[in-house]
Image (tube, helix red, strand yellow):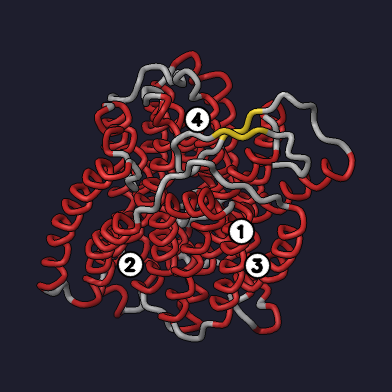
Amino acid sequence: MDDTGRTRRTTRKAPLVTTTATTDPPLEGAADRRRWLALAVVMTASFMDLVDVTIVNIAMPSIQKDIGASFSILQWITEGYALAFAAGLITGGRLGDIYGRRRVFLLGMGGFTVASMLCGLAGDPHLLVAARVLQGATAALMVPQVLAIVHATFPAHERGKVFGLFGAIVGLGAVSGPILGALLTQWNLFGLEWRPIFLVNLPVGVAGLILGRKFISESKAPQALKLDLVGVVLATGGLLMLLYPLTQGRELGWPLWGHLCMAGSVLVFAAFVAYERYKTRKDGSPLVELSLFKVKSFAAGIGVEIAFGIVCGIFFLIWTLYMQIGLGWSPLRAGLTGIPFSIGVSVAAGISVQKLVPKFGRKVLQAGALSMMGGVVLYIWETEHFGLDIAPWQMALPLIVMGLGMGLIVAPLTETVIAEVPREHSGSASGLINTTQQLGNAIGLGLVSVVFFNALDEKKMAQGQAGEAFAGAFRHGMWWAAGVLVVVLALMFALPRKATAPAEGVEAVEDAAAGDASAGASATGKETAATR
C-alpha cells in the first residue's frame, strides 16, 4: 500500500493472490519513486530465484568433479530445492498475509542470501544439499510475496505495465541463467571453480535487503487464512518417503526398506487427504482445497501440470549430464547449445497467448505436446545417428521443435486449467497450480535414478567408454520423457475446449500466470518461466 494510505485493498480467499482496487490517480513525486524502487527490489528477488535454478543445472558436472558428489547427490542438489520450494509455497504466502508481506519477504530474502553463502562455502556434498534445501525453503517465503506486494502497491490500471516489466525480467532470467552459470563456472574466478554461481547472490541479496527495508511498504490481509502446518508435514513426509528411496535406491542396491517406504507413502498421502477434509470442516483453511478436484477440467489440469513437471525434471538434468560428461563439452558450449530451445519457447509462447489460443483453445496445447514429442524423438534419432561426433548446430533443430512445443503449452496452461474453477476459489487454485508444478519437477528429478542412471552401461563405463554409456542412457531417459508426454496429451482432452476465465476471476488468472513465472520451474529448466 502506498504511503498516503489512499489505496484500498481487498482480498479473496487465496493464499498467494491479493487484489487491489483504487479510484485514485497515480502517485507523483517521492511516493511514486518509492513504489517503483520497491518494484525493482521484488523483481530482483524473482530474477535471483529464477537464475539460481538454471545456473545450478549447468554447473552439475563441475560440482561432481570438485567435491566428489555421487550421482544421487547431484539429483538432491536440484530435487531438494524443488521439494522444499513446493512444500513451502502456500504456507509462505499465508505467512505474508498474516505477519506482513514486507516482513516475510525480507526474511525470505535474507535467508536465501545466507543459504547462497552456505552453498558457496560447502566443501561436503551433503552440506551442499542441506544448503540447497534451505535455499528452497527461504525462496518459498520470498517468492509468494512478490505479487502480493505489487497488488498492495500499484492500482489495478497500472498492473498491466508492471506485469509486462515482470515478464521481461522473467525472460531475461530464464535465458541468462544457463549462460551466466556457464561463464562463472568456466572462468574459475579466484580458483573457486563452481562456487561463484552461488556467491554472486550475496551482493544482490544484501542490496535487496537494504533497499527493500527502505522502500517496500508493509501490508497484510485483513482476513488471512490460517496456517496448516500439519498438512505441510504430512505432504512433505509422504513425498520424502516416495522420493528418497527412489533417488537413493540404485546406489543402495534397491533394498527392501526402500520399497516398503514407497508403499508407506500411499498411507501418508491418504492421511493427508483425511486431515485436509477435517481442516476444511474445522476452520476452512486447508493447505489444499479438495473441492477443487470436483471440477473435472481442474483435476485433469493438475495432472497435466505434474506430468509436464516430470518431463522437465527428467530432461534438463540428463541433458546437461549428457552434453558435459558424455560428450565432454565445456559448460559454456553446453550453455550456448540451449539458446535455440529458449528462443523457441519465447516465440511460441507469445503467439499462443495472443493469437492461437483465443481461436483454437486447447488444440494449441495438444499441438504443443505433439511438437515436444516430435522434438524428443528427433533428438533421440540424431544422438544415435551422429554418435559422439554430434555438434551443437545439429542439435538445434530438435531443440527448436521442443522449445516451440513447450511454448505452446506453458504460456496458456494456467488459464486453461483454471477456466472452469468457481471464481471464489480462483486464488486457491492458482496457488495449488504453482505448487504442483514444483512437485512434478521434484518427482521427475527423483525418477532420473531409474530412467537415466539405472540405464548406464556398467561394462562400457568400466572400459572407459563413458561417452557411449551416457549417450545410451540419455536416449533411454528421452524415451521415458516421450512416454510421459503421451500421458500429458491424453489428460489434455479433459481440459476446456476454450480457456475462458471465470467472471471476476480474470485478475486471479493473470496473477497465477505471473506467479508461475516467479515460482517457476525450477530445476525444471526455468526456460519455461520465460513465457509467462
Q: Residue at x 52, y 58 (%)?
A: 141
Mark 2 — residue? 469
Q: Are marks 4 and 1 in contact (CB under 8 Å)?
A: no
Q: Which mark is residue 509?
A: 4
Look at label 2 and name its amino acid. Answer: Ala
Q: Which mark is residue 103?
A: 1
Q: Is disc 3 placed on a helix, strand or loop?
A: helix
Q: Give x and y (percent) for residue 30.
A: 87, 45
Relative vertical location of residue 474 with respect to residue 404 in this rendering, above or below:
below
Mark 3 — residue? 201
Relative vertical location of residue 273 with respect to residue 120 in this rendering, above or below:
above
Nearest to the observer: residue 94 or residue 160: 94
Between the residue at mark 4 and the residue at mark 1, the CA separation in whole angstroms equals 26 Å
The local crowd at label 1, few if under 14, some if 14 to 19, many if 20 or more residues have their Cα within 10 Å, is many
Q: Is disc 1 placed on a helix, strand or loop?
A: helix
Nearest to the observer: residue 430 or residue 391: 430
Q: Is disc 2 placed on a helix, strand or loop?
A: helix
Q: Residue at x 48, y 59 (%)?
A: 389
Lower position in the chain sequence, tag 4 or tag 1: 1
Between the residue at mark 2 and the residue at mark 3, the CA separation in whole angstroms equals 36 Å
In the picture, measured across the screen, residue 211 lies left or right of residue 524, that is: right
Nearest to the observer: residue 505 or residue 351: 505
In the picture, measured across the screen, residue 526 lies left or right of residue 456, that is: right
